[in-house]
Image: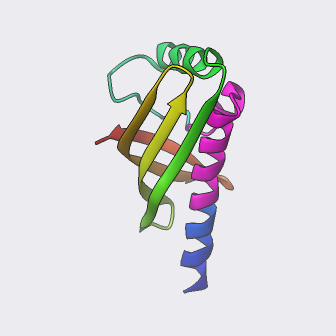
Amino acid sequence: APVKTDANADVTNAVNSWAKAWASKNPDTYLAAYSKSFKPEDGASRNAWASTRRERITTPKRITVELLGTTVEMVSANEAKVTFRQAYSSDALQTRSRKTLTLAKEGSRWLITRERVG
């Protein structure tokens, strides 16, 4: 059904914008990609997590984030799971990891509710 494809494309766009905001070192846009209900996996408070993320995004001189082999699985009309291999590099660090983002549709936007590595 076309509805599914549109949702797929919207979810993919949301994830790509998230990666792009990160790579352009734009912490406000990056953090705006996360739902208010987002809970960090490490049990940190959302505020502590946000300030750590902000620091990690603004400190490096340059950042590149590449998402490889992205797959979108629609869990329901308003929930999606996106899995990819993330290639991250900055002047200080290079990492590759598998990531799963869970996104929920809130109003007209798809927002990240969960971020899991591995």
Magenta region includes residue 30: yes
Q: Residue at x 48, y 21 (%)?
A: 46
Colour convention of the picture:
rainbow
Q: Is residue 45 above or below residue 83?
A: above
Q: Quadrant of residue 115?
A: top left
Q: How many marks?
A: 0
Q: Residue at x 67, y 26 (%)?
A: 27
Q: What residue occupies the far front of the structure in this picture?
A: 91
Which portion, as a residue range, is magenta? 11-34
Residue 70 percent location from the top left of the image: 46, 60
Q: Please give the name of the residue rendered at 33% of the width and 39% of the height, measured from the top-left corner.
A: 117
Residue, far left: 118
Q: Would you say residue 106 is visible in this rendering?
A: no
User: Eyeballing the image, is 77 above or below 40?
Assistant: below
Can you say which quadrant of the picture contains the N terminus? bottom right
Let me know if residue 25 is in the magenta part.
yes
**Where residue 45 sits: x, y (%)?**
43, 17
Viewer-nearest residue: 34 or 37: 34
- Residue 13 lies, with reference to residue 40, above or below; the image says below
Q: Is residue 82 left or right of residue 15?
A: left
Q: Quadrant of the C terminus?
A: top left
Give 28 or 20, whichever is nearer the viewer. Answer: 20
Left or right of residue 25: residue 99: left
Please state the horizontal and vertical placement of residue 16, each as a whole percent of the image.
61, 51
When asked about the image quadrant of residue 32, the answer is: top right
On the image, the x and y values in percent for residue 77 come to 50, 67
Report the magenta stretch's main SS: helix
| Quarter of the image where one finds residue 53 | top right
